[in-house]
Amino acid sequence: MVVVGGGPAGASAAYAAAVAGRRVLLLEKATLPRYKTCGGGIIGPSRDSLPPGFELPLRERVHAVTFSLNGRLTRTRRSRNMLFGLINRPEFDQALVESAVEAGAEIRTGVTVSRVEQHGPNVPDRRTVAVVLSGEHEPVLARAVVGADGSASRIGAHVGVKLDQVDLGLEAEIPVPPSVAEDWVGRVLVDWGPLPGSYGWVFPKGDTLTVGVISARGEGAATKRYLDDFIGRLGLAGFEPSISSGHLTRCRSEDSPLSRGRVLVCGDAAGLLEPWTREGISFALRSGRLAGEWAVRVAESHDAVDARRQALNYAFAIKAGLGVEMGVGRRLLRIFSRRPAMIHTALTGFRPAWNVFADFTRGATSLADIVRNRPVARRAL
């Protein structure tokens, strides 16, 4: 079995297949560790989806959230218990890949997958997928392939993933002196932005602040202006970022496929992330694990009918869990885009709303559970 992509989704898929006893080859185009544009928040669902015994390389434990409405009406909410943790993606991704390797997966870095083929001269039989690598004459042959190669996925293009929401995230990693870092210990900032559906964040990680904003694609200049203004009013404009980066996040449409033949997709490659916050790590970990488990069944299928059945079961598992959460997230984004002040007022002035937020970040509930089990929230949505 071949997994394409060494991020959280790919590493989780490789780990799940390896512990099930399958031979797994994990292909990653970069040399690990490598930087990824990401706030690095690890909420409860992410923590609960990690391999047994996995030690999170936490840089900060968050107990307080400061909310502001485009720099105004600032208020801080606190919790006795940790709300969520913050990590640096290079360390986190590297540790996940090492867990997959310890479980028995093999990894090759510095290789680029140009395409996959399920028919043609490179494919010896109907149970085989050919993974064609750039610059190599012989393809890698596999009984199943998991595509976890990010939001610009070539495997996703092969499957035919369809997207209905694309957003632009801009981020700066800003080293700060201890006197500034002390102000952010245990606390993050979430700012509801000036553009519809936009928001900004400050995530502290020791002597560095991760500062970013996100908004709908097509507003690139306005999004950049929001980031510059955000950094300026935080008093951070005088510090030189060590990294400035941008990234497009892509959400799948509800009818988008998750497989084609013996090829499955997960994580960003499948457009799986929460549409309101654009949180993707928990979706990557959970969908990656499911993809790895079902890819084992696909690999063991003796004909196309059985392989198709297993792939459909994978799609059902995704839609029954993550799909429901995405549906709630879409409704929240629509509300937030129209009435950000209402969301801000609820979280800062209505304790039940804050309690739901805190329970969600800790993993005590999910967006799906909120709708199923809280009639007031369901009616509000």
Image (cartoon, rainbow, N blue to C red):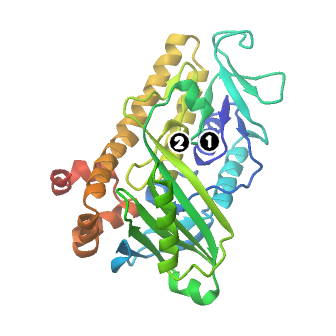
Secondary structure under tag 1 reads helix
When asked about the image quadrant of residue 16, the answer is: top right
Q: Estimate the x, y position of residue 43 in percent, counting from the top left.
A: 46, 60
* Tag of residue 153: none
Q: Earlier in the sequence, mark 2 or mark 1?
A: 1
Pick the front one: 39 or 169 = 169
Q: Estimate the x, y position of residue 202 in percent, counting from the top left.
A: 50, 71
In this rendering, the answer to whether 316 lies above or below 307 is below
In this rendering, the answer to whether 327 lies above or below 141 is below
Mark 2 surroundings within 10 Å by alpha-carbon count, few (fewer than 14), some (14 through 19), many (20 or more): many
Pick the front one: 65 or 291 = 65
Cα separation between marks 2 and 1: 8 Å
In this rendering, the answer to whether 322 lies above or below 168 is above
Give the residue drawn at x 32%, y 43%: 327
Q: Estimate the x, y position of residue 347 in percent, counting from the top left.
A: 28, 69
Give the residue drawn at x 49%, y 80%: 234
Q: Estimate the x, y position of residue 55 in percent, counting from the top left.
A: 62, 62
As shown in the figure, which amino acid type bears the numbered disc 2? Answer: Gly
When asked about the image quadrant of residue 81, the answer is: bottom left
User: Residue beneath label 2, please?
Assistant: 267
Secondary structure under tag 2 reads helix
Whether residues under marks 2 and 1 lie with C-beta atoms below 8 angstroms apart, the answer is yes
As shown in the figure, which amino acid type bears the numbered disc 1? Answer: Gly
In this rendering, the answer to whether 326 lies above or below 306 is below
Give the residue drawn at x 46%, y 29%: 314
Give the residue drawn at x 19%, y 51%: 378
Pick the front one: 49 or 187 = 187
User: Residue beneath label 1, please?
Assistant: 10
Mark 1 surroundings within 10 Å by alpha-carbon count, few (fewer than 14), some (14 through 19), many (20 or more): many
Observer able to see residue 297 = no
